[in-house]
Structure formats: C-alpha cells, structure tokens
Image (spheres, grey):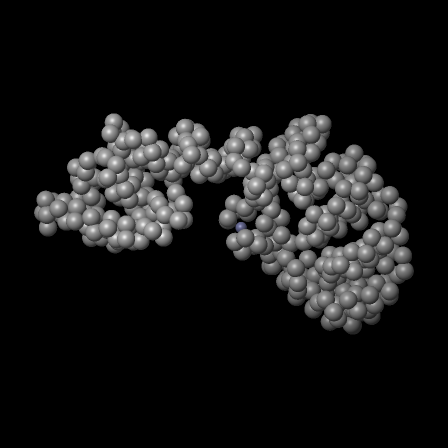
Amino acid sequence: MDMLAQWLLVGAAVGIGWALGRWGQGSVEKRGASSRMQVPVGIQFTFENYSDEAIDKYVEALEVERATLPMHLSIASHFRSKGEVNRAILIHQHLLASPRLDTASRERATFELARDYMSAGLFDRAEALLKQLEKSPDWGKESLQLLLEIYQDEKEWGEAKQAALKLDYRRDPITQKRLAHYCCEQADLLLQQGNIVDARRILREALGYDRSCVRVTFTVAQIHMNNGDYASALGVLHRVEDQDVRFLPEVIGPVVECYRKLGQEEKLQQYLGGLLERAHYSRLLIAYADSLRLTQGDRVALSFMADQLGRHISVRGLDYFLQLQILSSPPEERIRLEAIRRLTQKLLETRHPYLCENCGYSGSLLLWLCPSCKSWETIKPVQGIEGH
Ligand SMILES: [Zn+2]
C-alpha cells in the first residue's frame, strides 16, 4: 500500500474510531477527566493496521482546532500506551504551539503533556506543567494528585505536604493519612540528625492530620525508650490497641522491654492477659507464656501453650511450644522434636508475614508505603496460622 493510500485510510480509521469512542461517551464522561483521556477501543483497533509513519503524517496534516482536539489527544494517548512517549510528547507540544486553542483545550493538552513527561521519567518538566494547572477548576485536583506522586517518588516530603494541603484533605481520610506519613518521614530525617525537638513538633502535627496513625505512636515511643523513659513509652504504646488493633503484634516487643526495664513483670502479665481476651496473636501468646516461665516455671508455660494451641494454632506458636518441649524432654525424645522443629523453622523463614490489604502485596518487612500500590499504612501483619 503506498503512502497516500495509507494516509487516507488512517483518516478514515481515525474517523471510525473516534465515532466509536463518541458512541460510548455518555458512560465514559461520568468517570471523570482522566477517563476521558483513554483511547477509545475503536481507535486502538483501527491504529494497529497502519504504519507509524502514516499516522505521523496524518497528525501533521490534521488541523489543530477545538473539533479535532479529541483526535489529536486520542492518537497521542495511543502512542503513550504503546510506550512510544516521544511521539505522544511531539503531538502534545504541536497542540500547545497552536495559537487557535482555547484555554480549556490548552489546559487539557498541558495535563496530557505532563503525563507524557512522567512516563518518560522527566519529572522536573512534568512538575513545572502541573504547577501551572494547580488552580485550574478542571485539572487542579488531578494535577495535585500527580504532583504528590512525583514528590513521593523523589522523597521531597515538604513539597508533598504542601501539595496535599492544597487538596480538600479535611474531607479525605486517604490524604489525611498521607499527610501524617509525610510528617513521619520528615520526623525520621530529623531524628537521624539528632533534632528531637523539631521531630516531636512534626509528630504532633502528624496526629493533627490523623489521630489513628500508629507510626507516630511507634516513633514517639522509641524516642522515650531512647531517653530511658520507659513509663512514658508504655503510656504511648498502649494507644495502639485503640488506634488499630491489627498492629498489636508490632507493639508486643517494645511493651515487654519497657515493663521489664521498669521491673514490672506482674503488671506485664496483667496487661498481656487483658489483651489475650481481645486477640490471639501468636506473638502475644508467646510473650504471655514467656512471662509465665519467668514467674511460674516451664511446666506452667507449656501447659498454657498446649491449651492455647488447641484453640488457636499457628506456626510461630507451635515452634515456640516445640522449643519449650525440647528443653524439658529426655535426649531420645529431644531428637524427634528437633526434627519437627526444623520444619516449623523452615516455614517461618519462607513465609511473608506482612500483607497489603489494598493490593495483596506481601513481604517480610513492615513497610509504611506499599511499593506496589503506593498506599500508606495498608501493609499489616498477617493473622492466622501463618501470621503473627
Ligand atoms: Zn499495596
């Protein structure tokens, strides 16, 4: 097929594709501005049959005006979705160079060019364009959301906070959580520099955005523990059960350390016993059994674990039970139990005890920002047989 024939067919193809896109526009437009930028299925299909050169020539020849804008944008979006970002950039730049575009169309093209730059990893250029759109009634919110993504990836927490504050964060719990974690990131950096006063000020600010932020609790408790103030650390750590009970397994270690530093084994046992009435995490069972060992001996601890495992079995709990059993068994019995324990140890090594409740990402560390779906505080300790 010669170039002229291809060129004409591309025109017809785009027309058909655009018509198909418009046919389904009623439902598409309800999904918001970003959705309007999607390439219509018809256009994607019809593009596949023509050379890129033919499409380029068609785009160059297509006049830039309000009526043809959706075609330009659709073709550019098609290229970006194929990974050909340079072509998408050229089309959007071509649009913006035209003096015939009205303000609304210019803003739309600017937003799409910013998305191109983000896809190409040119974050400085994307940031400059998105800042131009911050106050746009149509594109302001989406531009700020993309700015947040850029600042998060670049770990520019102060800038991220400023962008989030420009959103309607008081009505949006997700943005409130983000703000709290941006503060926590800033506090972590200050603590690394030894600036405890400013770190504590920013942690208080974080609680102003999200009172249920357990990360603030952990960080403040750690500051108290570093200062040797274990009573204050305990006062803070006890808040976690009200903030988010799913993070309790993470609290057990520091709580045990604080009570023991204060020489309050009995109070520790009372506290853990109270928690056991509400939750049955294996870490909690083990901490309670450990305390029983110290105060009442191995037999009582073993009996407690045997009773609890009958009702709440877990790999970690079973491993601890075997450990206790091995210590109090004769040598020939010990060999058999150690063989079983090698299995529980292997299971504990290979499992992923943290899971993102938003996207299902799993890992061996508690991360505050999910590396997969970029959500804050959605990775939680796993519960149940393989959990904590
Ligand atoms: Zn996730």
Residue lying farthest front?
26
Q: Answer whether residue 83 is visible to the viewer in this image.
A: no
Left or right of 241 on screen, residue 296: right
Residue 74 percent across, percent down from the top left: 28, 44
Q: Residue at x 34, y 34 (%)?
A: 104
The answer to which of 164 and 186 lies nearer the viewer is: 164
Left or right of 173 on screen, residue 262: right
Q: Answer whether residue 368 is visible to the viewer in this image.
A: yes
Q: Quadrant of the C terminus?
A: bottom right
Whether residue 145 is situated above or below residue 158 in the rendered picture:
below
Q: Residue at x 78, y 72 (%)?
A: 333
Q: Residue at x 54, y 30 (%)?
A: 162
Residue 377 percent across, percent down from the top left: 60, 46
**Where, by quadrant of the figure, is residue 112 drawn?**
top left
Left or right of 387 on screen, residue 110: left
Q: Residue at x 77, y 38 (%)?
A: 225
Residue 201 percent across, percent down from the top left: 69, 30
